Image: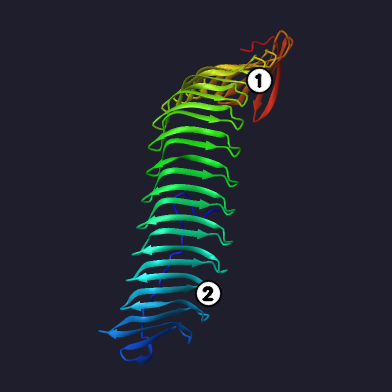
Amino acid sequence: MLKNDSSVIYFFRFVIILSCIIGPHTLQVTGQSNLFARYYENSDILMEEFEGFMQNGDTIKHGAYHFYFPNGNKRQKGQFENNQITGLWYIYYENGTLHQKIHFKNNLRHGEYHAFYASGGKMQQGFYLNGLLHGEFISWYEDGIMESIINYHSGLQHDEKSIFYPNGNLYQQIEMNMGQESGRFKQYYKKGGINYLGWKKSGMFSDTLKVFYENGKLQRIGFYENGNLEGIYKAYHANGNLLIESHYIGGILQGSFTEYYENGQISTHGKYLENQKTGEWISRYPNGKLYTIGEFKSNLLQGNWIVYYPNGKKKQTGPYHKGKPQGRWYFFRENGTLKKTGTFIFGLEQGIWSFFDESPDNLPVSYVFYKNGKQQGPHWQVKRNTYEKNIMINGYPLILRDKDENIW
C-alpha cells in the first residue's frame, strides 16, 4: 500500500531529546567550558553527555551533544550554541545504523535533510528553509524504488507532485498550488494505463473529468464545477457502449435518466427531481421487452405497478403507497393463469387471499386468511363441492369438513 495519498506525504519527524538535567555530573572543566553527563536511573550506563556552562544557576548547552541508547549505542549527536540546536545532527537506529541527517540553525531545521532505512537504503531526502520544507522532497520504498517526488514552497506542497506504485509505475501526477490540488490531475492503474484524467481547483474537481477502464476505453465522463457534477454525465460499458446518460445541476440528479445494457438496449428510463426518482419509470429486458412500469414519488414506489415475464405475460400487478404495497394485488404464472390474489395494507398481507390452479378454467384451490403478513385463522382448501377448513391453533391445523359451506 502506498504511504502517500493525493495530498499527504509522511516523513519521519525528528525530535531532539532534551532531558532535564537534574544534578548532572561534571566530568571535565576546560576554561569556561564544562563536560556534563547523565546516566540511566540506578545504573552506570551513560544516557547523555554534552559540553556547556553554568549561567545564573542554569545549565547552558554549548558545543558537542551526545545521547545514547541503554545498550550503549549512540542515538543522537550534534551541536548546541547557547542552548540552540545548530549545525549537522545525526540520528541512529538502536543497532547503530544511521537513521537521519538533519541540518539546524537557531533551533530550526535549515538545510539538507536525509533519512535512511535500517537496512541502509535511502528513505527520504529534501531541504528545509527556516524550519519549513522547501524545494524537492523525494521518498523511496525500502527496495530502492522511488515512492514520491513532491515540491514544497515555504512548507506547502507547490508545483508538481508525483507518487509511484511499489512496482515503480506512476500512480498520481498532480499540480499543486500552495498546499491545494490545482491544475492537471492524473491517476494511473498499477500496470500503467491512465485511470483518471481531469483538472482540480482548490482541491476539488473542475472542468471535464474522464475516467478510463484498464483496457483504455472510456468508463465515464462528466463536467465539474466547484467539485459538483454539472450538465450531462455519461458512463460506458467496458465494450464502449453507453451505460448511463443523466443530467446534474449542482451535483444533484435532475431530469432524464437512462441506463443501457451492454448490447445497447435500454435497461431503465425515468426522471429525477432533486436527486429523487419521480414520475413514470420503465425497465426492460435485454431483448427490449417490457419488464416493469410504474411511478415514483419522492423516490418511493407509488400507484399501480406492473411486472412482466420475459415472454410478455404479466407476472404481478398492484398499487403502492409510499413505497409499500397497498390494496389488491394479482400474481400470475408464466403461462398467464392467475396464481393468487389478495390485499396488502402497509406492505403486509391482510384478509383472505385466494390461490388458483393451472387448469384452463383457472379454478380456486384454497383460501388463506392473513393478519399482519402472517397466516392466521381459517384456511380453506377446495375439493370439488367440498371445502376443507383448517384452523390454525398454536401452529397446528384443526381440520373440519363442511359440504357446500359458504366460505365468505
Q: CA distance from mark 1 to mark 2?
A: 81 Å
Percent coordinates x, y for residue 85 in the rendering: 35, 74
4 relative to 383, above or below:
below
Q: Nearer the viewer, residue 317 or 185?
A: 185
Residue 345 in sight in this render: no
Task: Nearest to the eye among marks 1 and 2: give it.
Answer: 2
Q: Residue at x 54, y 41 (%)?
A: 195
Q: Amino acid at mark 2?
A: Glu
Percent coordinates x, y for residue 133 in the rendering: 39, 60
In terms of sequence position, does the residue under pointer 1 or pointer 2 come before the other? 2
Query: Which residue occupies the extreme left position in the image?
Result: 56
The local secondary structure at tag 1 comes to strand
Question: Which residue in the protein does label 1 denote?
Answer: 379
Question: How many neighbours does mark 2 have within 10 angstroms: few (below 14), some (14-19), or many (20 or more)?
Answer: some
Q: Nearer the viewer, residue 178 or 47?
A: 178
Q: Residue at x 57, y 50 (%)?
A: 169
Q: Amino acid at mark 1?
A: His
Q: How is colour applied across the structure in the image? A: rainbow
Q: Is residue 323 left or right of residue 401?
A: left
Question: Which residue in the protein does label 2 denote?
Answer: 94
Percent coordinates x, y for residue 99 in the rendering: 50, 70
Q: Is residue 66 left or right of residue 368?
A: left
300 relative to 66, above or below:
above
Q: Nearer the viewer, residue 56 or 179?
A: 179
Q: Residue at x 55, y 69 (%)?
A: 120
The local secondary structure at tag 2 comes to loop
Percent coordinates x, y for residue 354 in the rendering: 64, 16
Residue 267 occupies quadrant: top right
